[in-house]
Image (cartoon, helix red, strand yellow):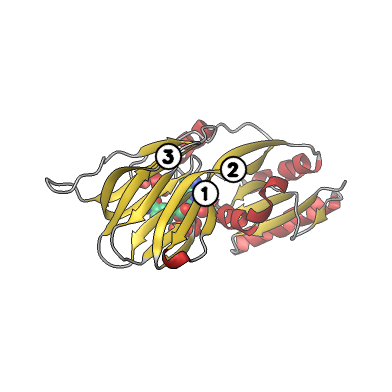
Amino acid sequence: MNLKFSITSKGNAKSNTLMHKIRTYLQDFGLEYDEAKPDIVISVGGDGTLLYAFHRYSSRLDKTAFVGVHTGHLGFYADWVPEEIEKLVIAIAKTPYQVVEYPLLEVIIRYQHGGKETRYLALNESTVKCVEGTLVMDIDVRGQHFERFRGDGLCLSTPSGSTAYNKALGGAIIHPSIKAIQLAEMASINNKVFRTIGSPLIFPGHHTCTLRPVREQDFMITIDHLTLLHKDVKSIQFRVADEKVRFARFRPFPFWKRVHDSFISD
Ligand code: NAP
């Protein structure tokens, strides 16, 4: 069977040129370009480009492996540099390749008045904020009330997303081999009257974390780079998804080395 591939570009000149080069090279090796049903998706740009590619192919995650080339700075998902593409193309053409799987976040939004629930998968995180005023949410952990949150917002992230928004909120960096999700606060109100735990919480695969609005509010809910306005929300449930994202690995590049090279020095 011929390996089918597709390429997603960030859209700038450098990424587009590289995209055309990779496409020609892979076709020269006899691989078929198939945008609808690729076995492998090559993302050219940055981590943001890979997020876009992930959502584009989220309905066939079990059949698709992703690989990222960065045309700017080193990314967590985009860890190949343009100078290495000949090497990458040869590696892709010489299938089978190794696949590593990372956990995803499942988000289920339920609505008042019996509205149909919506389900999303996030590769990095989902955040919940208010359109107006302070966000007030009851937080349940495994169906038990844990605390009432008042503040700017809440962020639920995956291990591979823990280096993104979550990190800016003081959350821990979690190795993606750990099946977990993390809850981080955005500017909680803490005084003699209102109290939250204050620390990020890490939930294992079999725990759910549910947010229940205390008052009628409209919410801005993000799923990675996508922002959606939700009205009449009854609850937002988070857990580790059954689905996983698959990355094609052609060489070792340990996660902690990526963390070091991205945030300390390369
Ligand atoms: P953006 O605002 O254009 O870029 C956000 C930055 O986050 C980019 O530098 C991107 O890297 C980087 N990034 C994405 N995923 C990452 C990961 N897993 N680990 C480390 N860095 C990561 O938005 P975007 O490109 O559409 O990406 C959406 C993401 O932005 C969200 O999922 C969220 O994590 C992040 N974000 C962060 C903050 C914050 O840190 N305060 C606030 C809002 C959103 P590239 O340059 O390689 O694309």
Q: Of the numbered discs in the image, which one, if any, rests on residue 106?
A: 1
Residue at (61%, 53%) from the top-left corner?
54
Q: Position of residue 5 (x, y in %)?
A: 76, 52
Q: How many residues crowd around disc 2 within 10 Å: few (fewer than 14), some, or many (20 or more)?
A: few
Sequence-first tag of 1 and 3:
1
Residue at position x 33%, y 42% from top?
Answer: 170
Q: Which mark is residue 242?
A: 2
Which residue: 45% across, 45% down?
A: 157
The reply to whether the residue tagged 3 has its Cβ within 8 angstroms of ligand 1 is no
The residue carrying pointer 3 sits among few (fewer than 14), some (14 to 19) or many (20 or more) residues within 10 Å by Cα, namely few
Q: Nearer the viewer, mark 3 or mark 2?
A: 2
| Mark carried by residue 30 | none
Residue farthest to the front, as pictured? 114
Task: Tell whether circle 1 marks a residue whose Cβ is less than 8 angstroms from ligand 1.
Answer: no
In the rendered view, does 108 fall on the left or right side of 220?
Answer: right
Q: Are marks 2 and 1 in contact (CB under 8 Å)?
A: yes
What amino acid is at disc 3? Phe
Rendered image quadrant of residue 166: top left
Between 95 and 20, the residue placed more toward the observer is 95
Q: Is residue 255 visible?
A: yes
- Element at badge 2? strand
Q: Residues within 10 Å of mark 1 (few under 14, many from 20)?
A: many
SS class, disc 3: helix
Residue 230 vertical placement versus 189 (above, below):
below
Pointer 3 residue: 263
